[in-house]
Image (tube, helix red, strand yellow):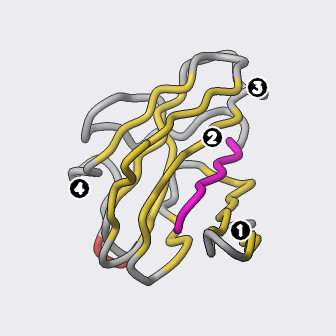
Amino acid sequence: MATYSLTLGTPSSSAVYVNTDTDETEDTLVEASKVVQAIEIDNTANSAVTYVKMANATAANIVPGTTDPGWVFMAPAQSLISYMFPLGTTMNVALTVWAVTTAGTDGTTGPTSAVTVRILVQ
């Protein structure tokens, strides 16, 4: 897992959490209450659709292919896509992500190449 965060500072006190190695292994980016404002998915290294899943839980409480992720974001093949939450969506436990090749709850097969996910939170 290659993750890091960038604090954007005042006045918004926003931060960007980045996972440059998003795959079928669930990664907790932060264990704190956060409001997600946007997510950017870089799937340019893959020739197939990737589904990034995001859950309001720690990685220890998630089983890919079994756990309902709460949010599923489709990233078309060889593309960079962004999703915005104008009013934000609250993650009050933790922010955990993983990526697979199947939509919905199912799926345990990760993309051929790692996907980079950037999440803007406040």
Which residue matches tag 4?
A: 67
Residue 11 coordinates in the image, percent (x, y): 66, 72
SS category of the residue bearing label 2: strand
Residue at 23% over, 56% down? 67
Residue 28 coordinates in the image, percent (x, y): 50, 72
Height in image: 82 above or below 26?
A: above
Which residue matches tag 2?
A: 40
Q: Earlier in the sequence, mark 4 or mark 3?
A: 3
Marks 2 and 4, how far apart at CA: 22 Å
Q: Quadrant of residue 60?
A: bottom left
Marks 4 and 3, how far apart at CA: 27 Å
Residue at 78% over, 28% down? 45
Magenta span: helix, strand or loop, mainly? strand
Q: Earlier in the sequence, mark 2 or mark 4?
A: 2
Say whether residue 38 is left or right of residue 31.
right
Q: Earlier in the sequence, mark 1 or mark 2?
A: 1
Q: Earlier in the sequence, mark 1 or mark 3?
A: 1
Marks 1 and 2, how far apart at CA: 14 Å
Circle 1: residue type: Thr
Marks 1 and 3, how far apart at CA: 19 Å
Which residue matches tag 3?
A: 44
Height in image: 53 above or below 91?
A: above
Q: Nearer the viewer, mark 4 or mark 3?
A: 3
Query: Is the C-beta separation of discs 2 and 4 under 8 Å?
Result: no
Residue 14 coordinates in the image, percent (x, y): 62, 68
Circle 4: residue type: Thr
- Is residue 8 one of those drawn in magenta? no
Q: Which residues are magenta?
A: 115-122
Which residue matches tag 1?
A: 3
Q: Nearer the viewer, mark 1 or mark 4?
A: 1
Q: Quadrant of residue 35?
A: bottom left
